[in-house]
Image: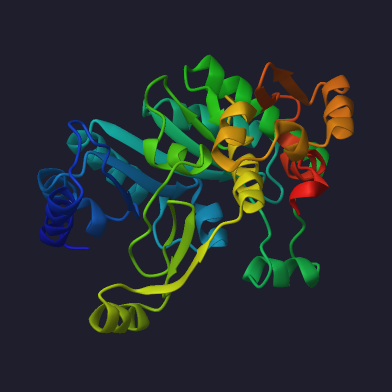
Amino acid sequence: MPPRLVAKLIAETDKLWGLTDGCEITLEANPSSVEAARFADLAKAGVNRISLGLQSLDDQTLVFLGRAHDVTEGLSALDVAQQNFNRVSFDLIYARPDQSIEDWRSELARALEFGTDHLSLYQLTIEPGTRFETLVRKGELIPADDDHAADLFELTQDMTAAAGLPAYETSNHAKPGQESRHNLTYWRYDDYAGIGPGAHGRRLKMATERHKKPENYLSGVARNQHGIKVEHMLSPETQATEAMLMGLRLAEGINLANLEAKTGIACDQMIDSHELATLSDLGFVSQTGSNLSVLPKGMPLLDAILPRLVSDNLT
């Protein structure tokens, strides 16, 4: 996206909505020399935070992941980003096939040395319909087993916390005050507007989805002054379910009393009390007053815990 277009979008957003002083404006960028050459102009356009998809600090892994950049190009882009933006984040993927504890310890230690205020550290997942799923099905790719992935997750939490970037969400780490405000909006289930092609939004208890294909989106804008494909009212049950599935990813957890006020559904109808007691006894979750959170011990098992906690009354 040319910097002049970024500047126009920010200016139009300010005109229509009004931007607060110090508003976080994040750009997600590929760590290539072509992208990096635009960073200075993007900063002048109003971008004040950047997130780079480095993915790995190992060239062989980048080839495996299908990335176009190598480590040298990626780190050069990171250096340029740090020269132009006060707030910089980058992504890494771990729990890769054949990745040992020591491999990840070394890579993460190197990543922490760059001194960014935010890191997104994701475990490799095999998504349906991807090249990786095909390789797994053929036996040509063996994913990390659950126990090894859990060990890598624990190491990640320990190292980032020791470096002053504790996890505030299951895969996201930041210095205090440097959490991604954009992503916190999703996880706290606050309202947000999704505007571009394929974007989803949640505003005023309504769910919106824009046309995914740019040509269909543009046709919708020309025809209807918007590119909305789907718009529907969210039921209280759906709101409560979505809020819990998102909010329990956060270290801070969710406030059930606030969610009850928002949805009109009583706390004891949202949570399976029997499962809550069991998971609490196991040290996976904790409830203090109206605040419910998944404890560090439970975070590696989050995908298994969430469907057990959410009451059948909501589904």
Does the rendering let one see residue 170?
Answer: no
Q: Is residue 151 above or below residue 303?
A: above
* Left or right of residue 195: residue 137: right
Q: Quadrant of residue 306?
A: top right
Q: Is residue 91 above or below residue 298?
A: below
| Towards the viewer: 231 or 284 | 231
* Left or right of residue 191: residue 289: right
Q: Picture coordinates of residue 274 (x, y %)?
A: 89, 32
Does the rendering let one see residue 129?
Answer: yes
Count every numbered label the image shows and give the total.
Answer: 0
Where is the C terminus found, in terms of image quarters?
bottom right
Where is the N terminus found, in terms of image quarters?
bottom left
Residue drawn at the location 14% of the way across and 62% of the way down:
5
Colouring scheme, one of rainbow, by chain, secondary structure, one colour? rainbow
Q: Picture coordinates of residue 107 (x, y %)?
A: 54, 35
Residue drawn at the location 81% of the way across and 21% of the way down:
283
Residue drawn at the location 55% of the way across and 27% of the way down:
167
Q: Quadrant of residue 150?
A: top right
Q: Is residue 22 above or below residue 222?
A: above
Q: Picture coordinates of residue 73 (x, y %)?
A: 33, 51
* Left or right of residue 246: residue 36: left
Q: Is residue 154 above or below residue 69?
A: above
| Towards the viewer: 92 or 290 | 290
Q: Picture coordinates of residue 44 (x, y %)?
A: 10, 44
Residue drawn at the location 71% of the way across and 32% of the way down:
267
| Towards the viewer: 19 or 10 | 19
